[in-house]
Image: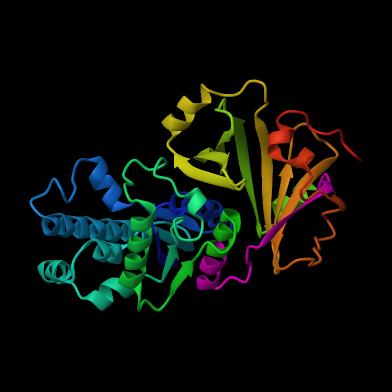
Amino acid sequence: MQIRKIVVTGGPCAGKTTAMSWIQNAFTERGYRVLFIPETATEFLTGGVAPWTCGTNLDYQKVQMELQLKKEELFMKAARTMDVDRILLVCDRGSMDNKAYMTDAEFQAVLKDLNLNEVELRDQYDGVFHLVTAANGALSAYSQANNHTRYETADEAVRLDQRLIAAWSGHPHLRIIDNSTDFEQKMHRLLEEISRLLGSEDIYANERKYLIRYPDVEWLRKQENCRRVEIFQTYLKTEDGLDTRIRQRGENGHYLYYEMIKRLTPDGHRVETERRLSQNEYLELMMNADTSRRQIRKTRYVLATPTQSIEVDLYPFWSRQAIAKTSVRGEGKEVTFPREIQMIREVTGEAAFRNSSLAMHPPEEEV
C-alpha cells in the first residue's frame, strides 16, 4: 500500500475549495483513493470556537493544533485499514498553517505544551502546495462573499499569504502556485505539481476536445487502465450573469456531489468556483433545477495511456458518435488516440459541444 499525505494551503480566496474538487476528480480517475481532512479552523469557527471566544489566542492555538494532529492521526489509521493499493490523503491546511496566526513566542509555547518538534511537524507531509491569494495578481477575483469565515481585506490577504509561505518555508517539497495564468490553468498547474510528486508524467495542460465515432464499449471495459464513471449534471435557475450546475459523479452506487458556479468579473474574465456537496445538499438544490434545460447524463470512460489520459463521454442522445477529451502540454502538439478510438474532427472551443449547449439542443449526429 502506498499512502501519500499532502497539504493544500494558501491565502484567502486562492481557490482552495475548488482545488479539492479538481484533486478528487483527477486522482480518483488515476486509481487513487482520495481522502480529505477538513480545515480545522473553519470547523472551530463555525462551531463558535475562536481566538476571540477562548481565553487567549494561545489557548485557541493549542486546541486547534491538537485537533489538527489528532484528525490526521485518525485519518491515517483509517487509511491503513483500506483494501486499496494507493491512497492520497489531502489536508485542507496543515499543522504549520497555524504558525501564521501566532507570534514566535506563542508558537514555541504550543510546541512545548504539545511536546512537538518544528522540523518533524513541518516535514511529516510528502508535499505542500500553496495557492496564492487572488488579492495578489488577480485582484478582480478577490471576494469575501463565498466564505462566511473570511474577513480579510485584499491587503491583509496578501500579508497573510506571505506569512503562510514563510511558515512552510524549508519543507523539501513546497510548491507555490501563483496567479500568472487564468484560474483554470492555475488548477492545471496544481494538478501537474501533485502528479510530479506522485511520480506521474501524465501532466495536465491544454484541454483538447474531439468528436469521435461511437467506441467499442466492450473493448474499453476490458482495458486494465480504464475506469468507468457515471455523471449526472443538472443546471439550476440562477441570477443573471451566473451559470450554476450540480453534478453527481461516481460508480457502482457510490457517488460524490459537486456544485459549480461560473461568473464573469467586471473585467470580462470567467471565474469558476466548485465545492463538494453532501447528498442532502445536492437533493435540496435539485429542487431549483432549470427545467428549460435537460439533465446531462453521460457515461465516461477514462483511459490512461503511457503518454496521456483520455476521457470518452457517451451520451444517451447519440448512438453513432461520442466526445473524447485529453490534455496536452504545449501549443500545436499533435494528439494521437489508440486505433480503437476513431476521430472524426476536433471540436475544441466549439460552443455547440459544450455541456451547457448539449443541455439545450444537442447537434445532429455527423456519422
Residue 266 in sight: yes
The residue under the point 82% across, 54% down is 341
- Image quadrant where residue 182 sits: bottom right
Q: Is residue 301 left or right of residue 76?
A: right
The residue under the point 43% across, 64% down is 130
Residue 335 vs 362, above or below: the answer is below
- Image quadrant where residue 65 sits: bottom left
Q: Is residue 175 left or right of residue 232?
A: left
Residue 317 pos. (x, y %): 78, 31
The image quadrant where one finds the N terminus is: bottom left
User: Does the magenta run of residues contain 351?
Assistant: no
Q: Of residues 171 and 27, which is closer to you in this image?
A: 171
User: Does the magenta run of residues contain 209?
Assistant: yes
The image quadrant where one finds the C terminus is: top right
Residue 124 in sight: no
Q: How is the image coloured?
A: rainbow
Residue 244 pos. (x, y %): 56, 34
Farthest left residue in view = 55
Residue 107 pos. (x, y %): 18, 68
Q: Find the magenta span and give its range.
A: 191-215
The residue under the point 80% across, 60% down is 337
Residue 215 pos. (x, y %): 81, 47
